[in-house]
Amino acid sequence: MQKKGNRFFRFLSGQEKGIAPRMTLFNDVYPFYPQQKKPVVFDVDLIIIIIVFLVFAFSFLLILPGIRGRARLFWLLRVITSLFIGAVIVAVNFTSDWESGQVTANTTYKSFSLDVVHADVGVHIGLGGVNITLVGKPVEQLNETINYNEYFSWVFGTDYNHEFEEGLERGLPNPILYVAEKFTTLSPCGMPDQYRIAGHYASATMWVAFCAWLISNMLFSMPVPVYGGYMMLVTGSFMIFALLSFSTVRNFSPCVIHFGAVSLQPIYGASFWLTLATGLLCFLIAAVVILLDYVRPELLKAVFDLYEDEEEEVLGEVYINPHVAEIKTLSSQPDFKLTIKNS
């Protein structure tokens, strides 16, 4: 009998030759499998984007003391505002909180088990995938640390169904697999087609807005800054188009995610509202630039550091040496003669 017990233990742990280890319950302790986790909002790509734009801002602050007069303040406002808009346009393509939802429920933890855990289940949807979290309350339950954060992608070049199957093989908790299954192509909810297509169109529109932002910055550096205002208007328009593209998922009946008596229903998250605020800021900047071009063009030139160059040209024509002008007048007389008398 003792030999059978040892053989059974070796079978579970995979020490028996030719037998692969299996996930199963042994002495009321579930085996822990370390997994690659992804943050809900901030990931490596997002951190790199933030660092790049912070480097640009810091580099400008180093050269800011070299700008003379009131133009220093105008340059500071222009550059900081422009970098903020560009950073938002790029960063929201990699965030996972365009829609977010969280619910606290009592739910089963693992397959083939009746053990129930009290935890927070969260879903965070971005343009390229969905982040699903499971955090126990308390974190330590069933002799385990219940703190999961799993990311499933649907961007081009990835297979969401394959990532879901890998989650099944790794033995992810039931709540995570239950929510992730709602976004598979085999789900009757139709959620994957809605979010994947809406996310693709919204992401493409945001990149067009980024190109328009680059062009507007180049036009603002030219003698006619009003054209930069027009391109800033285009930038804000494409950001609003991205919001409209993502909002099309609301046209379909949502698939309810139930956990007992409670349901998990995502709502618009921080990235959605940040994109909306930045788009409205682009509209405001464009309106101010276009209005100043019609009402106060000299003030618009002063803001973009174009007024001082014209002053220097005018001053250069005013300060003329009068003696040089008098000599030129005498030498131009046709009857001018020089007579020398002998003493």
Image (cartoon, rainbow, N blue to C red):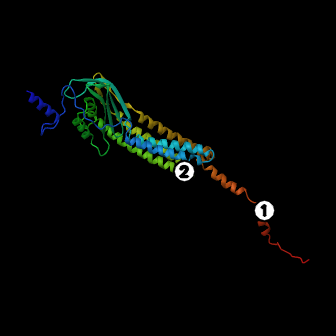
Q: Residue furthest right?
A: 343
Query: What's the residue at 48%, 42% (across, down)?
Result: 85
Task: Find the residue positioned furthest to the top.
Answer: 261
Task: Tell me if I can see residue 253 in this picture.
Answer: no
In what element is the residue under mark 1? helix
**Horizontal and vertical percent position of residue 42:** 39, 37
| Mark 1 crowd level (few <14, some 14–19, many ≥20, 10 Å Cα) | few
Q: Residues within 10 Å of mark 2 (few under 14, many from 20)?
A: few
| Marked residue nearer the N-terminal end (1 or 2) | 2
Image spot of residue 244 (x, y percent): 40, 38
User: In the rendered image, which residue does mark 2 sit on?
Assistant: 221
Quarter of the image where one finds residue 6: top left
Residue 90 placed where, x, y %? 42, 43
Which amino acid type is marked by label 1? His
Name the residue located 42 percent from the left edge and 33 percent from the top edge. 270
Q: Is 310 above or below relative to 87?
A: below
Residue 146 or 196: which is nearer the viewer?
146
Disc ID at residue 163: none
> Mark 1–mark 2 contact, CB under 8 Å?
no
Q: What amino acid is at disc 2? A: Ser
What quarter of the picture does the C terminus occupy?
bottom right
- Could you give the CA–CA distance between mark 1 and mark 2, rounded to whole angstroms? 41 Å
- Residue 323's disc is 1
| Relative depth, front residue between 169 and 300 | 169
For the N terminus, which image quadrant? top left
